[in-house]
Image: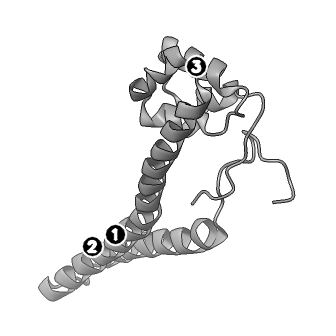
Amino acid sequence: MSEQQNFVNHAKFVPAFHLFAGPVLIANLIGAVAQGIHLLLAGHLNSWAVVALVFHVLVASALVVTVFLARIFPLGVQDRVIRLEERLRYQQLLPEDLRSRIGDFTIHQLVSLRFASDAELPTLARKVLDGKINDRRTIKQMIQNWRADNQRI
C-alpha cells in the first residue's frame, strides 16, 4: 500500500463487491419488483404468473442476501482472529494491572484498538476500559499513531 493507513482511509473497498455484485443484484431485485407492479397494474397476472413473479422476487432477494452474507461472514471470522491476536499482543504490551483486565475488552474494543501503535496501546486501552468506550469509530478516532492492518478482508 503506497499511502500511510489512517482512520480516513482504513476501510476496505472491494470494487467487485461494492461497484458490481451488490449494485447489479440490487438492481435485479428492484427490476423484479417493478416488473410485478407493472404486470399487476396492467392486469396481466393469472395465478401462474403470480407464482412465477413471487418466485422471481424471492430469488432476487435471496441473491442480495447471499452476496451480503458472503461479505459479512468473513468479517465476523476476521474479528474473532483479531480478538485472539490482540489478546496475545496485550499480554506482551500492557502493564500488569491492565493485563488482568484483558478479558474485560469487548470485541469492538479489541478490533478498534488493533490500529494503535505499541507505544500508544497501554494508554488507550486504559482510557477505553475505564471510560467504557465501545464504539469502534470513537476508539479509532482516539488513535494518534496508526498501526496499519493491510491484511483485513
The residue sitting at the top extreme is 130
Measure the alpha-carbon separation of dots 2 and 3: 54 Å
Under mark 1, the amino acid is Ser
When asked about the image quadrant of residue 58, the answer is: bottom left
Q: Mark number for residue 95?
A: 3
Question: Which residue position is annotated with label 2?
Answer: 58
Residue at 83% across, 48% down: 4
Which colour assignment does the render follow? one colour
Question: Which residue position is annotated with label 1?
Answer: 61
Residue at 53% across, 74% down: 21
Of mark 3 and mark 1, the one earlier in the sequence is 1
Is 20 displayed left or right of 48 in the figure? right
Residue 141 position in % (x across, y down): 68, 28
Closer-to-camera residue (71/47)? 71
Residue at 75% across, 41% down: 8
Residue 149 position in % (x across, y down): 67, 50
Height in image: 64 above or below 4? below
- Label 1 CA crowd tier, 10 Å (few <14, some 14–19, many 20+): some
Q: In what element is the residue under mark 2?
A: helix
Residue at 71% across, 25% down: 120
Answer whether labels 2 and 1 touch (C-beta < 8 Å).
yes
- Name the image quarter holding the C terminus: bottom right
Under mark 3, the amino acid is Pro
Under mark 2, the amino acid is Leu
When asked about the image quadrant of residue 7, the answer is: top right
The residue sitting at the right extreme is 2
When asked about the image quadrant of residue 104, the answer is: top left
